């Protein structure tokens, strides 16, 4: 492999201010993406919308001016959560390639409002026959009216309600170190 084919070999500079080797490298296209030419202008950073995540949890973005009407798979430099779906994101393109989007930030409308508490994340659970896991640091509470089920970090399961029914067509087992009825 000669020097012109290896984009990882450093270009030597003869003296201070001598950029002839760098200019030669640009002209020959060594190390440049083959999707752009040296004279092409890269698409500027643009705003898109976080549309969701694909099956590999890669972010999908929409409303990008360079690819209007299409969903693009993107990489990201910032952590993204499902609660951010629908938010505007700042997008750049790797080497000007419109197929290689990189999310570099999430745009917050209330970025200057430091006194407001962050909005509570919305939780949506869709049951489709697969296992779903809901996790919390301290506790999880399911509540409807006066009935509730609480799971605590200490391992307690607390069921409260005006009427509790436990029914089984098979074996119904109550087991514990101590059982207190009434």
Image (cartoon, rainbow, N blue to C red):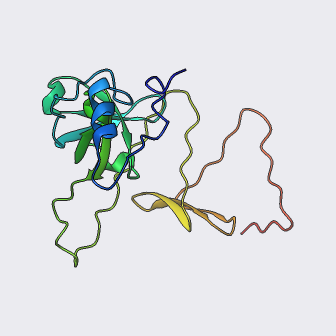
Q: Give 118 or 43, whichever is nearer the viewer.
A: 43
Residue located at (16% from left, 28% from top): 40
* Residue closest to the far bottom: 115
* Residue closest to the far front: 15
Which image quadrant: the C terminus?
bottom right
156 in relation to 26, above or below: below
* Direction from residue 26 to residue 46 in the image, left or right: left
Residue 91 is situated, as x and y percent measured from the top left of the image, at 24, 42
Residue 46 shows up from this direction = yes
Residue 168 is situated, as x and y percent measured from the top left of the image, at 70, 38
18 in relation to 169, above or below: below
Counting the numbered discs, the total is: 0
Residue 161 shows up from this direction = no
Residue 156 is situated, as x and y percent measured from the top left of the image, at 67, 66
Q: Residue 37, located in which quarter of the rendered image?
A: top left
Which image quadrant: the N terminus?
top right
Q: Residue 179, located in which quarter of the rendered image?
A: bottom right
Residue located at (35% from left, 56% from top): 121
Residue located at (29% from left, 28% from top): 72
* Direction from residue 182 to residue 47 in the image, left or right: left
* Direction from residue 94 to residue 56 in the image, left or right: right
Q: Give 121 or 40, whichever is nearer the viewer.
A: 40
Q: Give 127 or 119, whichever is nearer the viewer.
A: 119
* Residue closest to the far right: 177
Residue 32 is situated, as x and y percent measured from the top left of the image, at 34, 29
């Amino acid at each position: 492999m000669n020097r012109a084919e290896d984009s990882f070999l450093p270009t030597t500079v003869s003296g201070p201010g001598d950029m002839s080797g760098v200019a030669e490298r640009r002209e020959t296209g060594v190390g440049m993406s083959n999707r752009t030419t040296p004279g092409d202008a890269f698409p500027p950073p643009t705003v898109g919308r976080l549309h969701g995540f694909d099956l590999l949890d890669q972010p999908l973005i929409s409303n990008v001016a360079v690819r209007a009407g299409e969903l693009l798979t993107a990489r990201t430099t910032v952590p993204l959560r499902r609660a951010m779906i629908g938010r505007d994101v700042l997008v750049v393109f790797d080497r000007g390639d419109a197929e290689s989007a990189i999310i570099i930030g999430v745009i917050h409308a209330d970025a200057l409002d430091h006194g407001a508490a962050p909005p509570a994340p919305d939780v949506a659970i869709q049951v489709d026959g697969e296992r779903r896991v809901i996790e919390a640091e301290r506790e999880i509470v399911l509540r409807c009216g006066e009935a509730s089920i609480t799971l605590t970090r200490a391992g307690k399961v607390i069921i409260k309600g005006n009427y509790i029914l436990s029914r089984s067509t098979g074996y119904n087992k109550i087991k514990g170190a101590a059982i207190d009825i009434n």
